[in-house]
Amino acid sequence: MEKFKTYFLMIGLTLLFIWFGGLIGGKGGMILAFLIAAGMNFYAYYYSDKQVLAHYHAIPLDESNAPQVYRIVEDLTRKAGLPMPKLYIIPDPVPNAFATGRDYEHAAVAVTEGLLDLLNEEEVAGVIAHELSHIKHYDMLIGTVAATIAGAISMLANFGMFFGGRDEERNPIVTIALMIIMPLAATIIQMTISRSREFEADKGAALITGHPEWLQSALSKLDNYARRGAVIHDADPSTAHMFIVNPFSGLGGQVANLFRTHPTTEERIERLEEIKYQLRRA
């Protein structure tokens, strides 16, 4: 069912992109948009995980060089009913983590050195369980495709504004759509998908560990650290949705709102408190 929803979303976003191509360039624009979308989806499906891991200089971990982390992940994957993902560490003092990969057999979890230094073992387990929940629901692929299509629509809008014909031929309504409506709609779709998936991953982590307070404590520490304004090295807005906390969340003001791909930490902790109450009643 999760795989079906993933493919349905990929097809839906691709069709939106193709329609927008037709709005700009007619049949020729639709064909060009289809070819671009097909190429982007193919690349996102097979190579986006390798690209993001390389971008953040992730180093592979195994049982020999990180036995404690390996044991935590091994225990949680068994509880989640998942195969063991590949593990990576990012040599960066800013605490954060993300999951990537197209399916269960090609999944990876990456944590920064700062996360392992900041959190205790239970809090690390809460974070890892959150990332495993993303893997279980194919969130990594959904987020990557949504971000790719959203970026492509914005690019197509800019292209259409410059090459969409002579000024006297342009329809004002089409022009407004090119400038504002479509890129904004694509961005809203991407942000909405990302925020809802974070809530679900938090819930999944609470159910996997049976201890929502582990993730609550981890999120509180990560948020407090982020408020110092520290940003992970090479942080990129296009991958911000992947991390357990937005790498730009500590910048504040307009910048934080511009890159907000996550619910607020307060909202997440509050929802985990509700889950904790439900688990106690059960």
Image (cartoon, rainbow, N blue to C red):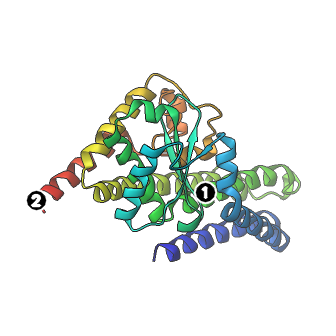
Residue 177 in view of the camera: no
Foreground of the two, 14 or 23: 14
In the current view of this chain or complex, which residue is farthest to the right? 166
Query: Closer to the camera, 73 or 32?
Result: 73
Percent coordinates x, y for residue 187 in the rendering: 58, 52
Give the x, y percent position of residue 222.
Answer: 40, 34
Q: Amino acid at mark 1?
A: Thr
Residue 144's mark? Answer: 1
Q: Residues within 10 Å of mark 1 (few under 14, many from 20)?
A: many
Q: Which x, y percent locates residue 267?
A: 31, 44
Residue displayed at 54% across by 58% down: 140
| Whole-percent x, y for residue 120 in the image | 34, 35
Furthest-left residue in this view: 281
Q: Which mark is residue 281?
A: 2
Left/right placement of residue 278 relative to residue 78 reads: left
**Quadrant housing the C terminus:** bottom left
Say above or below: 142 vs 259: below
Q: Residue at x 34, y 40 (%)?
A: 121
Point out the frontmost of discs 1 and 2.
Answer: 2
Q: Quadrant of residue 160?
A: bottom right
- Report the amino acid beneath label 2: Arg
Q: How many labels were placed on the picture? A: 2
Under circle 2, the secondary element is helix
